[in-house]
Image (cartoon, grey):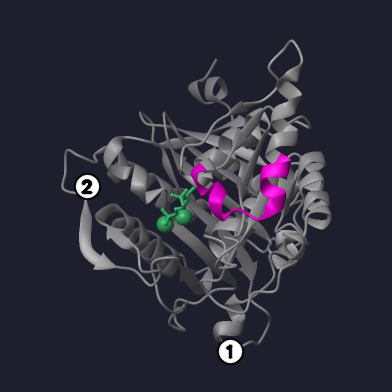
Amino acid sequence: MSLAADFGRTLTQHVLENQEHHPDARGQLSALLTQIGVAGKLISAQVRRAGLIEVWGATGETNVQGERVQKLDQIANDTFVEVLKRSGCVAAMASEEEESFIAVPADLAGDYVVVFDPLDGSSNIDVGVSIGTIFAIYRKRPDEAVSLNTILRRGRDLVAGGYIVYGSSTVLVYSSGQTVDCFTLDPSSGEFFLTRSDVRIPEKTSLLSTNECNSPYWPRWTSKLIDTIKSRNDGPVREVSARHIGSLVVDFHRNLVKGGLYLYPVNRRTGRGKLRLLYECNPLAFIAEVAGGRASNGEIPILDMVPTELHQRCGIIVGPKADVELAEKMVRDFPESDS
Ligand code: AHG
Ligand code: MN
Ligand code: MN
């Protein structure tokens, strides 16, 4: 048996084969997904050397969100921007680490718009804990001159989305709407190989992921929901366990595979969420829906939210459909005005 047969399909093979079934496929989307794989490998190589080379720690700057920029955040951002620019497939992009959107010069511009969080879970970089990159892809509207409105689109308009986890292995997960597929980087050959295809999120919640220290700031419904889920352990067998890494993308990936509910509600005192709609919540909501799950801000699906700002934040509940719907019911049953 050949080595390739032992390992199965590569990311590039899969993307090219899928292109035939995709209504949007004109070659550029396939090239773009392949180039995102290249950016993932480059970032993964830096992550794997964290501590050995000077990528630990902060740059001394704060980003547009007022957060301390880690060196690896900056490296990941520069890598993604550069690879996307040179791909010839992208007209505009927006990053968590960039104040404004980036318009690609006309001679390099392509048909797509990409939004991304170059490094999610920055607080875990210096301690060897899993982190990731999140991305989402829109097709630019024909004949549209690039402006902020090119980027401010509902998640429902996405043509593809995904993420790369730098964990015990490097895993790239993407969907262009039909299936969710996972590829693991083989460090010896430098190839991503298909390791899970057509992932479906388990229907039952067996893991619960939230930062429970935020409970004083939670809306009323959140504690009610968590109590309801915990009460499933009143029987003889433990049904639900807590798992929270503090890197959204990695918490999401584990929950996707094992069946977990992730919650980051808005802060009841400020009315603001923490996670960013365009490049954190939308891509994960897209993956969750294709995998048979649901993602909501408590009132409407995340993908139906209409963004008004580049770095807009929102509350999110994402995971198995039935429990996201239960959360939406709790939001209706326990309105803030009654507190
Ligand atoms: P980022 O590192 O891209 O700024 O995102 C951090 C996010 C997310 O990854 C994580 O789950 C969450 O912030 C944790 O925040 P808390 O410390 O508020 O729980
Ligand atoms: Mn993030
Ligand atoms: Mn980030």
Range drawn in magenta: 213-225
- Name the front one of labels 1 and 2: 2
Residue under label 2, please give it. Answer: 56
Query: Total number of numbered labels?
Result: 2
**331 vs 60, nearest the viewer:** 331
In the image, residue 195 sits, relative to residue 39, either above or below, namely above
Q: Earlier in the sequence, mark 1 or mark 2?
A: 2
Question: Outermost residue toward the front?
Answer: 339
What mark, if any, has residue 145 been given in the picture?
1
Q: Position of residue 46 (x, y in %)?
A: 28, 45
Q: Position of residue 201 (x, y in %)?
A: 72, 35
Residue at horizontal 51 percent and vertical 71 percent from the top: 311
Left or right, 125 with respect to 277, comes to left
**260 vs 227, nearest the viewer:** 227
Q: Is residue 215 in the magenta section?
A: yes
How crowded pointer 2 is (Cα within 10 Å; few <14, some 14-19, many 20+) is rated as: some
| Most frequent secondary structure within the magenta stretch | helix
Amino acid type for the residue under numbered disc 2: Trp
Which element is circle 1 on? Answer: loop
Q: Do the residues under discs 1 and 2 have CB atoms within 8 angstroms?
A: no
On the rendered image, what quadrant is the N terminus found in? top right
**263 vs 233, nearest the viewer:** 233
In the image, residue 73 sits, relative to residue 327, either above or below, namely below
What mark, if any, has residue 243 been given in the picture?
none
